[in-house]
């Protein structure tokens, strides 16, 4: 017998679980369906972000950063530790605990907000007068499938790692982000294909722990979406750390060896090269998850990439069917998915949900961290926009000196005529936290002068943002 709801959300990643909670807050009877399972076969809501993405990678980044600090920098503080060792099993155990805490937190939030949760794979069955029928295939063998129906459906099925053609993930030697987070020992030699967020973060984790890491990138420029000045500063830091990054390469045949893999490639000079590694992480982008959704049963429109086609408000071609997050156009970011999920729930309720793509922040959680919002200097030049730029180095920031981390800078770009902030770019300590002030400034169309006139706590890293704003008018006080 079918159970009827007002809203069914397919997927409990950042976009899906937040959409379900917001819809429930707005008074709807809501169901959320998700197939992720933990090691015991139980539900593990949170999607890629919680299970094999944002959360576990940050846990490993934190552990590996502690290890590197203890090994290389504790002596500067007068702390003696003796020989520093890493217990990879303990580190992974902590990571798994952090993941489970987040899984359990989402289940608690569903219960608190009276969201009915169904563990299994969802697929469309048909559309009828009552709305849409959704089948739930339970993951446990022998478990009875269920059918749900609702007039409103939000698809939030996320994305999965893209494979190299002819080189499938075996999660033993050729790894996706999932396998890269589960290595049971530190590889002696690690190869990474792709110098995006995932490649740099996972490469950083295992380099800190002792791996010899080489990153192969097909594009001729490093972090092409990042402001060029910021990207150069980051590249200098990574080079100094020993993270080897080769740009402009063309990857050829990848062969399995007795132990590890062999990667043939052509370097930027056109010279043939061979790289042998114990493990290979492939991070060349992600593909939207629509396989198994049975979109054709109801005529749900997909594009050539397999993504669900939506308008600016996340409406699909079907009345009452919406889609958010990685499975639609736009940046594949957890916080973008969350904002879309909230906006769609509010639109279903007749409210005016809001998502401003121009003020979505981007963060790479390496050391130094890289974060930005708004437009880059190269974009402004290409568009012929007259602008002013101000930069301030963390080398001149008292809190950064006390932390022992003075790498990087804050860069602010403002309109030459109106002084409205057009972009803020940060490479350095805690950039992921500092960028929030910049997002707020752009959202409220603040000027550089507004930030320059706001009192910032001393000593704090945020003073670098104020000084960059002052530098836009060539009046920085501490540099």
Image: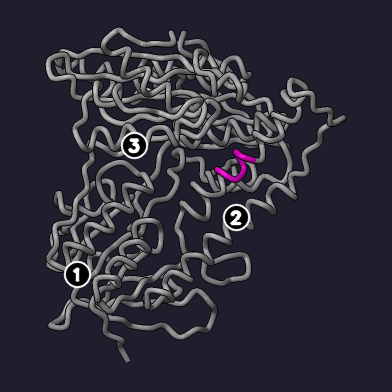
Q: Position of residue 439 (x, y in %)?
A: 30, 36
| Marks 3 and 2 in Cβ contact (< 8 Å) | no
Instruction: Name the disc covering residue 175, or none.
Output: none
* Residue at 12% over, 83% down: 129
Name which of mark 3 and mark 2 comes first in the sequence. Answer: 2
Mark toward the viewer: 1 or 3: 3
Q: Can residue 247 be seen in this snapshot?
A: yes
Q: Residues within 10 Å of mark 3 (few under 14, many from 20)?
A: many
Task: Report the span colored magenta.
Answer: 58-62
Q: Secondary structure at mark 1?
A: loop
Q: Secondary structure at mark 2?
A: helix
Name the quadrant of the C terminus. Answer: top left
Q: Nearer the viewer, residue 249 or 228?
A: 228
| Marks 1 and 2 in Cβ contact (< 8 Å) | no
Q: Quadrant of residue 27?
A: bottom left
Residue wearing tag 2:
98
Residue wearing tag 1:
298
Q: Quadrant of residue 25?
A: bottom left
Q: Position of residue 388 (x, y in %)?
A: 23, 12
Residue wearing tag 3:
361
Image side of residue 406 versus residue 150, left or right: right
Name the quadrant of the N terminus. Answer: bottom left
Image side of residue 468 versus residue 252, left or right: left
Q: Can residue 252 be seen in this snapshot?
A: no
């Amino acid at each position: 017998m079918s159970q009827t709801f007002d809203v069914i959300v397919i997927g409990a990643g950042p976009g899906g679980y937040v959409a379900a909670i917001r819809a429930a807050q707005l008074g709807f009877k809501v169901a959320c369906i998700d197939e992720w399972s933990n090691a015991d076969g139980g539900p593990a809501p949170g999607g890629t972000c919680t299970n094999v993405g944002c959360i576990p990678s940050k846990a490993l980044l934190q552990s590996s950063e502690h290890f590197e600090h203890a090994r290389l920098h504790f002596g500067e503080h007068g702390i003696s530790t003796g020989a520093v060792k890493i217990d990879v099993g303990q580190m992974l155990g902590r990571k798994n605990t952090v993941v489970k805490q987040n899984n359990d937190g989402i289940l608690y939030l569903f219960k608190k907000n009276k969201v009915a949760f169904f563990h299994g794979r969802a697929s469309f069955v048909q559309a009828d007068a009552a709305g849409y029928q959704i089948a739930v295939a339970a993951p446990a063998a022998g478990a009875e499938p269920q059918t749900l129906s609702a007039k409103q459906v939000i698809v939030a099925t996320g994305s999965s790692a893209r494979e190299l053609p002819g080189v499938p993930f075996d999660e033993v030697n050729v790894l996706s982000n999932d396998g890269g987070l589960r290595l049971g020992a530190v590889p002696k030699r690690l190869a990474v294909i792709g110098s995006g967020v995932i490649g740099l973060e996972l490469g950083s984790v295992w380099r800190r722990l002792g791996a010899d890491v080489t990153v192969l990138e097909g594009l001729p420029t490093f972090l092409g979406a990042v402001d060029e000045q910021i990207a150069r500063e980051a590249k200098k830091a990574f080079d100094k750390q020993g993270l080897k990054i080769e740009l402009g390469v063309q990857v050829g045949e990848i062969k399995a060896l007795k132990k590890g893999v062999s990667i043939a490639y052509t370097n930027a000079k056109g010279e043939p090269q061979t790289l042998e590694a114990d493990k290979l992480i492939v991070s060349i982008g992600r593909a939207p998850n629509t396989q198994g959704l049975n979109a054709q049963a109801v005529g749900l429109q997909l594009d050539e990439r397999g993504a669900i086609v939506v308008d600016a408000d996340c409406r699909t071609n079907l009345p009452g069917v919406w889609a958010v997050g990685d499975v639609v156009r736009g940046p594949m970011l957890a916080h973008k998915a969350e904002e879309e999920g909230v906006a769609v729930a509010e639109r279903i309720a007749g409210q005016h949900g809001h998502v401003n793509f121009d003020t979505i922040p981007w963060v790479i959680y390496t050391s130094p961290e890289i974060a930005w919002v708004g437009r880059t200097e190269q974009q402004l030049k290409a568009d012929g926009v007259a602008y002013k730029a101000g930069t301030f180095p963390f080398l001149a920031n008292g809190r950064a000196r006390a932390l022992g981390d003075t790498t990087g800078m804050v860069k602010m770009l403002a309109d030459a005529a109106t002084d409205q902030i057009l972009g803020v770019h940060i490479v350095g300590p805690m950039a992921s936290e500092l960028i929030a002030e910049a997002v707020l400034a752009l959202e409220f169309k603040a000027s550089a002068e507004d930030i320059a006139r706001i009192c910032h706590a001393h000593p704090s890293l945020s003073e670098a943002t104020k000084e960059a704003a002052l530098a836009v008018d060539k009046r920085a006080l501490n540099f």
